[in-house]
Image: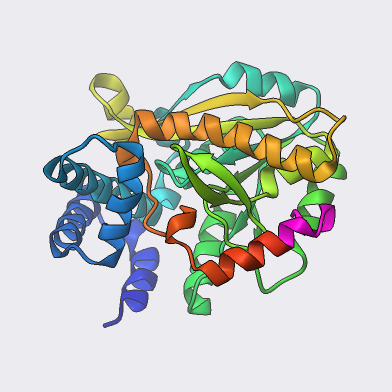
Amino acid sequence: MSGRTLLTLAWRLGGRVPEGVVRAVGALVADVTWFRHGTSVRRLESNLRHVRPWLSRRGLRALSRTGMRSYMRYYGEAFTLSSLTAAQLTARVRTIGEDRLRGALVHGDRVVIALGHQGNWDLAGAWATQNLASVTTVAERLEPEEVFQEFLAFREGLGMTIFPLTGGRDVFRELLRAVGSGSEAGLVPLVADRDLTRRGIEVSLFGAPARVAAGPAALAVSTGAPLFAASIWYERLVGERRRRAGSPWGIVVAFRPVETAPESLSRAERVIVTTQAWVDEVAAGIAAHPEDWHMLQKVFVADLDPARDADVATSVADGPGGVR
């Protein structure tokens, strides 16, 4: 049975299996994958080396093992998330800086949130839909199509509005419409710590050049929408909160406002400067909780294909139209 088939089955059956069993299976899969030390685990360790450059090889291996368990925990929670009660969902999320975010929503704004592949962003999105405002976001198109449709149905079932990154209409234009024409407050969270479009922005991430998505900054600059950065990490639950959550794990979501670059700069320059600003905020969260950064892909320029880098550089040099 292929990995894709297993993933599809997990989506369909996860909510019917006791969550403790799902967690145990996820931990086992994480440990086996970590022990095999394949390409994905080696990439995770290479990325984590930027975050913790002083670690010994043994220390890095220990961190990557914790990271793989966090990554599989995310998937296990995703498989069972649709079966949670409203009370369980609320008990699993603790926030920092929520008051400032609510302050922006009070004015009826659509707020753009830049975040990384950290913690459980689907749990955070489901909580936000229930407790803050409507959520509109973008999903990477997975292969095969039936797996992508499972992800899409899952997230839409949680109350989110999802635009596919590729294979549909221009996603940036769709986001512009969602932000600019919204008649009520809403959230537009974008997982943006990896460039998937060949139109990304080069930033400094842990002191090294990296490519991230231009979307959050471009959307905020183009529409004037407030921009926040969010960091998400896991925390152990105890006592009454653990009982209410029905899980030993919850997440912390920290919101921080990000100032957009001054209007005296060109649009392209504003997008670049603003992107670095939110990256600095997200990086601070990753540095504090590196085990929950689920970055098993290439993000640093030194690891990317040179031909791809040249294509990206040309795209950005084209001016405002090339920064999406």
Q: Quadrant of the N terminus?
A: bottom left
235 relative position to 193: left or right: left
Closer to us: 261 or 238: 261
Query: Residue 141 location in percent, x, y?
Result: 56, 68
The residue located at (23%, 20%) in the rendering is 239
The residue located at (47%, 36%) in the rendering is 86
Residue 182 visible to an observer of this rendering: no
By secondary structure, the bulk of the magenta-drawn segment is best described as helix
221 relative position to 26: left or right: right
Query: Residue 146 location in percent, x, y?
Result: 50, 77
Q: Which residues are magenta?
A: 315-324
Magenta stretch: residue 216 in it?
A: no
In the rendered picture of this protein, how many numbered marks are placed on residues?
0
Query: Residue 173 location in percent, x, y?
Result: 81, 57
Residue 152 visible to an observer of this rendering: yes
Magenta stretch: residue 318 in it?
A: yes
70 relative position to 267: left or right: left
The residue located at (30%, 62%) in the rendering is 40
Q: Quadrant of the C terminus?
A: bottom right
